[in-house]
Image (cartoon, rainbow, N blue to C red):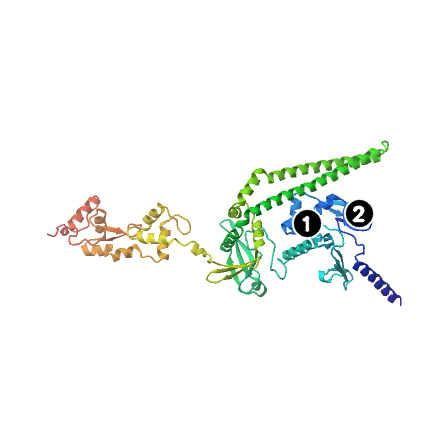
């Protein structure tokens, strides 16, 4: 009976809490930035610095779309964020420190900042081993949700938009993987691509080419899950260029308006940050004045307390000085960010959006955000060419055909014009002579290098060009031994006659190996050859017999 009575009492207490929550009257500890006033109504925190910090957080997330980017923005601006202590001797005090990623997520997921009364967002479940576990409940299963129950920092529509953007960011690593936020890499279509074969989400893989990151788009989920080959593997350089041309054509008419809006947003963002830093200076000034008044009211003879209060006053003064110096430093940086010359540059770029798009100072992440403003998704299908089906947010679709990128060997292939020129030069020149002629024009090989005899020989071989030897043989020229047999002399004598231009020969190698033209009806005589041999070799005995000295009539 005692156990049953405890169960009934607990159920009644639980029922009373639920009934009070359904009316929106249950008092729940508010998050930072909200506080109960003297009448018991939940309102915005009376501290203006706390309010400005929260408004800046929501504005930064609206601008960046990422909790991590919000943390980075506060860190880069050297801004502090409030946190309330709920236990210990300093219970109820507000302390200021650096903003953390988990803190941003808690604030963004909390519907109370949208002015809604919520109860039942989390359930506590006991484990079998004893400790309890807190389970997050889906919004459809919340016990109570009353929008507009009290004042907030944003409307309910903005809260739902924030949840949608957080959900899209979480899908980058979740089971769906249909969307992902814009990252810093150069792949413009990261997170927007769908496979045209299986319908899955395509991912990005980077590799270094010519010292720069180059993206490839892959459909590899089945390959990872079931060890199957890749569904599609498409180089992304040509696709990104085609997408950039489409975006430039779509955005150019409104480029001026967009640029002016961006300029106003930058200015308002810096002014908001400066107002928040001013609040920090005012708080530091108040704490320094408070420490001074405490020190002035103490009994001068009580040196133990006076020394402690004096040290606290000096500490507050140092904090005030550091805060003022930090504000001045940030203001100087802000003035450098939006100088008059840079404002003029923004207006000049606004009239030429293609120049803004191709400007190397434009971050890749900003280009991706521009694409996401217009494009819902892009479907890729690789066949003889790459078919891009672009679906815009307004429902309009567009199909593009992009040629397949060249393979590595195709990119290093020699220009067909150069191949034809080599084929023509082989009629009259050797490999070294052809290399000198091509380098004098100048021309480069497929690998971007100057020509060498080895490169010319390789091109001749790979493109199956007729060798110079075969060309000369086809023209009726004779080899060294054939010419020696025809004239009934030694090969050495044929070389001597060629050197003295008695016989006409044509080199077919860089080693001066020649093929010779037929001497015709008046071949050189043996005696002439003997005299030339003796004159060229005075210290040697002629090798021809004496009876060969006579010439035929």
The single residue placed furthest to the bottom in the displayed view is: 1
Q: Secondary structure at mark 2?
A: loop
- On screen, residue 474 versus residue 275, left or right, reads left
Mark 2 vs 1: CB contact within 8 A: no
- On screen, residue 245 versus residue 269, left or right, reads left
In percent of width and height, residue 17 lies at 82, 59
Foreground pick, 371 / 183: 371
> Which residue is the site of mark 1?
58
- On screen, residue 325 versus residue 453, left or right, reads right
Foreground pick, 510 / 414: 414
Q: Earlier in the sequence, mark 2 or mark 1?
A: 1
Q: Quadrant of residue 110?
A: bottom right
What is the number of callouts on the image? 2
Q: Quadrant of residue 406?
A: bottom left
In percent of width and height, residue 231 lies at 53, 63
Q: Secondary structure at mark 1?
A: helix
Which numbered marker is on residue 92? 2
Q: In whole angstroms, how far apart are the C-alphas of marks 2 and 1?
A: 24 Å
In percent of width and height, residue 121 lies at 74, 59
The residue under the point 66% across, 41% down is 271
């Amino acid at each position: 009976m005692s156990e049953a009575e405890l169960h009934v009492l607990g159920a009644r207490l639980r029922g009373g809490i639920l009934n009070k929550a359904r009316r929106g009257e249950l008092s729940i500890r508010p998050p930072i930035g909200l506080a109960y006033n003297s009448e018991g109504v939940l309102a915005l925190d009376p501290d203006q610095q706390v309010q400005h910090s929260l408004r800046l957080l929501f504005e930064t997330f609206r601008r960046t779309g990422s909790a991590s980017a919000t943390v980075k923005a506060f860190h880069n601006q050297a801004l502090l964020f409030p946190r309330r202590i709920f236990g210990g001797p300093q219970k109820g005090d507000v302390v200021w420190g650096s903003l953390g990623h988990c803190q941003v997520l808690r604030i963004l997921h909390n519907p109370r900042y949208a002015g809604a009364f919520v109860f039942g967002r989390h359930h506590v479940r006991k484990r079998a081993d004893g400790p309890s576990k807190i389970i997050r409940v889906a919004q459809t299963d919340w016990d109570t949700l009353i929008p507009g129950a009290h004042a907030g920092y944003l409307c309910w529509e903005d809260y739902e938009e924030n949840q949608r953007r957080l959900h899209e960011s979480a899908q980058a690593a979740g089971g769906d993987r249909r969307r992902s936020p814009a990252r810093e890499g150069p792949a413009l279509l990261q997170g927007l691509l769908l496979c045209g074969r299986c319908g899955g989400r395509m991912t990005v893989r980077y590799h270094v080419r010519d010292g720069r990151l180059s993206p490839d788009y892959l459909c590899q989920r089945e390959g990872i899950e079931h060890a199957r080959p890749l569904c599609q593997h498409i180089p992304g350089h040509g696709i990104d260029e085609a997408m950039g041309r489409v975006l430039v054509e779509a955005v150019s008419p409104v480029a001026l308006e967009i640029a002016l809006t961006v300029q106003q947003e930058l200015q308002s963002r810096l002014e908001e940050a400066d107002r928040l830093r001013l609040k920090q200076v005012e708080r530091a000034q108040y704490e320094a004045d408070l420490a001074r008044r405490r020190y002035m009211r103490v009994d001068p003879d009580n040196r133990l307390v006076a020394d402690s209060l004096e040290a606290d006053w000096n500490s507050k003064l140092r904090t005030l000085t550091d805060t003022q110096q930090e504000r001045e430093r940030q203001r100087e940086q802000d003035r450098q960010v939006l100088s008059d010359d840079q404002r003029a540059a923004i207006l000049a770029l606004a009239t030429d959006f293609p120049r803004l798009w191709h400007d190397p100072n434009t971050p890749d992440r900003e280009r991706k955000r521009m694409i996401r403003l217009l494009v819902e998704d892009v479907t890729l299908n690789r066949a003889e060419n790459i078919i891009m089906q672009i679906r815009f947010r307004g429902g309009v679709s567009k199909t593009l055909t992009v040629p397949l990128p060249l393979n590595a060997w195709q990119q290093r292939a020699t220009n067909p014009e150069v191949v034809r020129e080599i084929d023509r030069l082989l009629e009259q020149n050797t490999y070294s002579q052809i290399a000198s002629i091509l380098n004098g024009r100048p021309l480069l090989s497929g690998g971007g290098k100057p020509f060498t005899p080895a490169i010319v020989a390789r091109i001749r071989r790979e493109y199956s060009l007729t060798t110079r030897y075969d060309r000369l043989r086809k023209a009726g020229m004779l080899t060294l031994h054939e010419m020696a047999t025809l004239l009934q002399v030694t090969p050495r004598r044929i070389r001597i006659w060629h050197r003295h231009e008695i016989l006409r020969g044509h080199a077919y190698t860089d080693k001066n190996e020649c093929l010779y033209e037929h001497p015709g009806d008046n071949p050189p005589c043996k005696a002439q050859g003997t005299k030339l041999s003796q004159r060229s070799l005075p210290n040697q005995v002629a090798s021809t017999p004496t009876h060969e000295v006579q010439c035929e009539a």
